[in-house]
Image: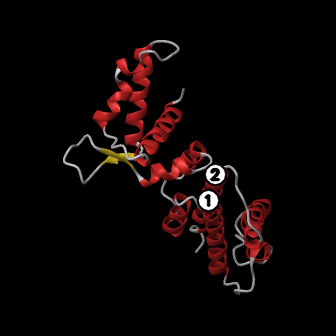
Amino acid sequence: MPIDVRGLGLLRVFVAAEDAGDEWNWVHSHNLLNAPSWQGRHIEGNLGEYLRGISEAWAWLAAQGLVAVRPDQSSGDAYFVTARGRALVSDSDPLGRFHAEERLGVDLHPRLEARVRAQFLLGEVELAAFAAMREVEIRVRELSGASESTIGVKLIRDAFGGGGPLRQAGRDSGEQDAVMNLYAGAIGLFKNPSSHREVDYSDPLVAAEIVLLADLLMRLLDQYP
């Protein structure tokens, strides 16, 4: 079983224990690693390997910041489930959300970093994707000098189309059209629908990739004077 699956399974145990009023710490969690506690239970394969797997899962939880040392306890063995850990456990797809957050572990464009990442980590993945693409639209408007009333795909085609202020004369006409279509497609598919109706990305990885696409588009816009 992959370590992330093991870790999230163990995390559910910790959350349930905390909610039940049990004090979970490393010494207490050794009950999970103590061979006598598994007597009478049916475990396929080698018991030692199974317990090492649990120990690895604990180490993974700590490394990912899903559990942390309690600051109100003198013992360094006292742990609690972090806010991020609880958010993951409460999500309908904790593993998917974890991998989506990891996908956004890179530095985002400065105009996306603070607000978009915060929304994503709060679980508002649809709003994060929309905000990222809206920032692209705003930047195109700034660079092209278009009016506030010009929005969406029309804004993109006016800016990058023939005679547009962002049409780069030194490039091949096919490349110029490709740039226009790239931005128009991104705005038309990922920004415009969210402007008019609620969009639900059942897979948070899709929302993460939309944010990363917006990041790329913003960095390409940085090359314009």
User: Quarter-wise, where is residue 37 in the image?
Assistant: top left
Report whether residue 172 is seen: no
Kind of residue indicated by mark 2? Pro
Question: In the current view of this chain or complex, which residue is farthest to the top?
Answer: 46
Q: Which mark is residue 67?
A: none
Q: Is residue 89 above or below residue 37?
A: below
Give the x, y percent position of residue 103.
55, 48
Residue under label 1, please give it: 125
102 and 36: which is toward the camera = 36
Kind of residue indicated by mark 1? Val
* Viewport quadrant of the N terminus: top right
Q: Which mark is residue 204?
A: 2
Which structural element holds mark 1?
A: helix
Could you tell whether 17 is left or right of 220 in the image?
left
43 and 85: which is toward the camera = 43
* Viewport quadrant of the C terminus: bottom right
Question: In the current view of this chain or complex, which residue is farthest to the left?
Answer: 74
